Image (spheres, helix red, strand yellow):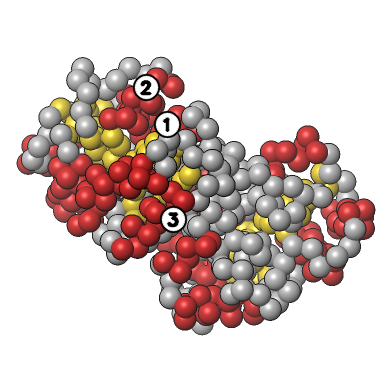
Amino acid sequence: MADTSAIIDRLRRVVGDRVIVDTDRMASYTTDWTGRFRGTTVAVVRPGTTAEVAGVVRACRELGVALVPQGGNTGLVGGGVPLHGEVVLTLQGMRSLSPVDGTAGQVTAEAGVTLAAVQQAARSAGWEYGVDLASRDSATVGGMVATNAGGTRVLRHGDTRAQVLGVEAVLGTGAVLSHLGGLIKDNTGYHLPGLFCGSEGTLAVVTAARLRLVPALPERTVAVLAFATVTDAVAASVLFRRSLTTLDAAELFLAPGLDLVCSVTGLPAPFDRRYPAYLLVEAADRSDPTGALAEVTGSVGGVLDVAVATGAHRRAELWRYREAHTEAINTLGPPHKLDVTLPLGSLAAFIDDIPGTVRSVSASARTWLFGHIGDGNVHVNVTGVAPDDERVDGAVLHRVAAAGGSISAEHGIGAAKRRWLTLSRSAEEIHAFGAVKRALDPDGILNPHVLLPEQAGAR
Ligand code: MLT
Ligand code: ZN
């Protein structure tokens, strides 16, 4: 492998002075958002065009140096930081957003465009973007494609893969693929955009995406319902999904998480009393959905209290109780983030049991549970465990697999769950993954230390 100065010189020949080598300036690129994953690198390179990305990839290939593509660095599984000394290829320099195509209901965004910018552009043109998540101001299109980001609207509009109609991307060979026409029916072979969604930068560096937009539904109502048990909250979410055609989101949080959010943010508690479990639902339509939401709420069993918001300000306040969980938990030190899906029939028992499972492995650990209950997706966050102590991770993920769940619902595998991929994928599937990886990245330079077990992606 080339020495540091040869790498820096070669990268400078591609992007000029947009190569960061100063340790302080590189710090925000080498540590993940949670602080659990800390890496090092010789350089952070910031190309401004797809041609420059291709030049960087070709340079790294010639030098035999691995690279980690990075968007807004909001990933939660250590998949976007250089844990093995890789060069960091930040896509933050690619921020062009096409005008919204109001006829097609589509927009083309370069990889470094934030989710919030896409949402804003869509809204200004009378459309909406179907994906939303709390890190919208930092999360970028390239990262969201690479991780197949989910979020709070999946039950209505699907995940990122369901929004992506085309991509531009650079393979591990430096070849550029560009298919951004946005035709909805385009049945001409392998669906590469779908393949790149969730590939975690291991197959290609996504430089732009053609995104479908959804009709704007400006009338919104949010309700937080309180329950005595998680079982009641899950049953209520099923009823909402079945009966409320305007349902946009169904999110769960529990008393300890709400207490923490209120103490960290200073928000007042939503109710005079403390209840064990809370379900946040949002309905959205062209006309006021409050009546329909109230009607379904009236037929839900076990509701102990309800807070309803129609105005934008109060709606945002109710959402804060759920969305602020991530930042509140991070104040306790780097958490282990175990984002999992369970079959809905097993979800309540899992949520009730998992704190005990965690405690049996680590007495100092504390478990925080919340998530997108409408999708069967619960975020198991564990604090009080050293960043490199993986015993809790193993215990939780084995329990998930035993219950027929998936070890990653929406965050991906990254570095954090790589050793447990076999719990959710067969040897044959992983072999096929490896064959695809070798075909598109023959020298194994694109994010080689995530997702696939070490041997599966090797040449
Ligand atoms: C969320 O939905 O808030 C995040 O995906 C979960 C997390 O921070 O663990
Ligand atoms: Zn989530």
Name the residue beneath numbered marker 1: 324
Circle 1/circle 2 CB separation < 8 Å: no
Q: Position of residue 336 (x, y in %)?
A: 48, 44
Mark 2: amino acid: Cys
Q: Position of residue 318 (x, y in %)?
A: 32, 28
Between discs 1 and 3, the one toward the N terminus: 1
Horizontal side of residue 218 vs 169, given as left or right: left
Name the residue beneath numbered marker 3: 394
Front residue of 378/48: it is 378
Q: Secondary structure at mark 3?
A: helix
Front residue of 333/33: it is 333
Crowdedness of circle 2 by 10 Å Cα count: few (<14), some, many (20+)? some
Q: Residue at x 55, y 57 (%)?
A: 414
**Foreground disc of the pair 3, 2:** 3
Front residue of 448/239: it is 448
> Quadrant location of the N terminus?
bottom right
Mark 1: amino acid: Ala
Q: Position of residue 90 (x, y in %)?
A: 70, 50
Q: Position of residue 52 (x, y in %)?
A: 79, 59
Between discs 3 and 2, the one toward the N terminus: 2
Circle 3/circle 2 CB separation < 8 Å: no
Marks 3/2: CA–CA distance:
31 Å
Front residue of 223/264: it is 264
Mark 3: amino acid: Gly
Q: Which quadrant of the figure has residue 2?
A: bottom right
Horizontal side of residue 94 vs 385, given as left or right: right
Q: Secondary structure at mark 2?
A: helix
Marks 1/3: CA–CA distance:
27 Å
Name the residue beneath numbered marker 2: 262
**Foreground disc of the pair 1, 3:** 3
